[in-house]
Amino acid sequence: MATSTKSDPKNMDLTLRIWRQDGPSDRGHLQTYEVSDISPDMSFLEMLDVLNEQLNAKGEEPIAFDSDCREGICGMCGLMISGHAHGPEKTTTCQLHMRSFKDGDTITVEPWRADAFPIIKDLVVDRSSFDRIIQAGGFISVNTGSAPEANAAPVPKQKADRAFQSAECIGCGACVAACPNASAMLFMGAKVTHLGELPQGQPERWARVVSMVSQHDHEGFGGCTNTGACSVACPKGIPQDVISTLNKDLRTAMRQGG
Amino acid sequence: MATTTLSAPTARKTTIALKLLMAVTGAFFVLYVLLHMYGNLKVLAGQEAFDTYAHHLRTFGEPMLPYGGLLWIFRILLLGSLIGHAYAAFTLWSRAGSARKTKYAVLKTAASAQWMRWGGVAILLFVVWHLIHFTIVKPVINVDGPDAAAIKASPYTMVVASFQLWWMVLIYLLALAALGLHLAHGVFSAQQTLGFTQTPKARARAKGIGNLTAALVVVGFAIPPLSILFGLVK
Ligand code: SF4
Ligand code: FES
């Protein structure tokens, strides 16, 4: 690599191998790019922005990738970075900083790979299969009108905490991306646990799990082998226990003839 | 894109139902393996105890059951479990393959799913050999040892003659290693699938039970062949 003149000795020169794919039917390939003078305080996406500016200046097609909030709360971003979903830290891609890398590193950037997440372009995948799973049962039915009295439905602290923790899922899809079976059980488990721990989730509880899991299977996600790679990759630290709850709910639904 | 409406979703047709089938049949295998281990350890008590035990297995429940009745009940249940376990495993295996047709160029996550699958296939092949070896054909493998008639007459003679060969012990130890790895993950996995691990504490306990079961089975099954190989049991 040519020795670049760095504006700060802490800055880095990096080699990037990035997945380029023109559209859903293109075969795609990994392409190598060099970026230099990258500050450790940049986020990973800002580093890609720098690369895209270079590409724009040269009249080349910039790399397509998803992002929205860039605060780690919306779940829009998500890249497979050198074999780790969202990179080497337990966070979202937008909250990953370049200080997690070293000068001279080669970084491979790939899209989430799952047939239920078809690639739209480059690093952008279509995750509407997640929306359809939620539409199938990840909701509660309430009457419209004025909000009910907050203390009318008491929730034990433990259940409230677990519901809250599960509700932290941002639907980013890292669990699917990291799973050796491309299974979405952690995502579903989080939703089923979130609603199943609360009184409002009870009326539709057993129908919910059956509809969601059926939709999940129909979308072409794989089955769970309880390896736990999902939980390791999850930027919100959703634990594997929610999958156990999902399994238990499905078993109960089965016993009830669902 | 329009929402795809499914015709009456059923719990029984889901991938989780397949996992439940694996968990229940796996649990039955674990029970059987522990009983089998207990029987093997009788070899330490000497020829008479071992052969009597083998005979009792066949006369158990007589006259309510015919000769060998209990064994046949077990064999049929085991065969049924095997079919269920393998059917679920291969169905999920092929699903996983088509759920990610394009592989990652670089991947750094646990590959224990592959270990379970290929390990399971290895155990299956071993079981076929094991049945030929000690149940169906009972070939004379140790040519310097007792003849075919003596082997058929006494299970003890058959077992001891086999494990006086170092390479035979090696085959069984390798199979045992595969079984140990399979159980360490499988016993945990079954508990997770059955919904027994809904808290971090319960999950840690389930993992402990998995490792403990694996260790118990590996040690319990390794003792008889090693004792024979080193001449502690003759
Ligand atoms: S469970 Fe975690 S990894 Fe999966 S979609 Fe939700 S936040 Fe992302
Ligand atoms: S862009 Fe919103 S979580 Fe990363």
Image (cartoon, coloured by chain):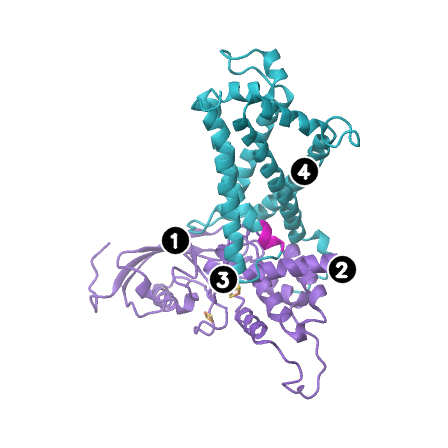
Chain colours: A purple, B cyan
The amino acid type found where label 1 is placed reads Gln
Q: Which residue is mark 2?
A: A256
Q: Chain of mark 2?
A: A
The amino acid type found where label 4 is placed reads Ile
Q: Which residue sits at x=78%, y=28%?
A: B66
Q: Which residue sits at x=55%, y=34%?
A: B123
Distance between the alpha carbons at the discs numbered 4 and 3: 42 Å
Q: Nearer the viewer, mark 1 or mark 3?
A: 3
Distance between the alpha carbons at the discs numbered 4 and 2: 26 Å
Distance between the alpha carbons at the discs numbered 4 and 1: 46 Å
Q: Which residue is mark 4?
A: B83
Q: Chain of mark 4?
A: B
Mark 1 or mark 2, earlier in chain: 1
Find out whether residue B160 is within the magenta segment.
no
The amino acid type found where label 3 is placed reads Val
Q: Which residue is mark 3?
A: A124
Find out whether residue B193 is within the magenta segment.
yes
Mark 2 vs ligand 1: CB below 8 Å: no
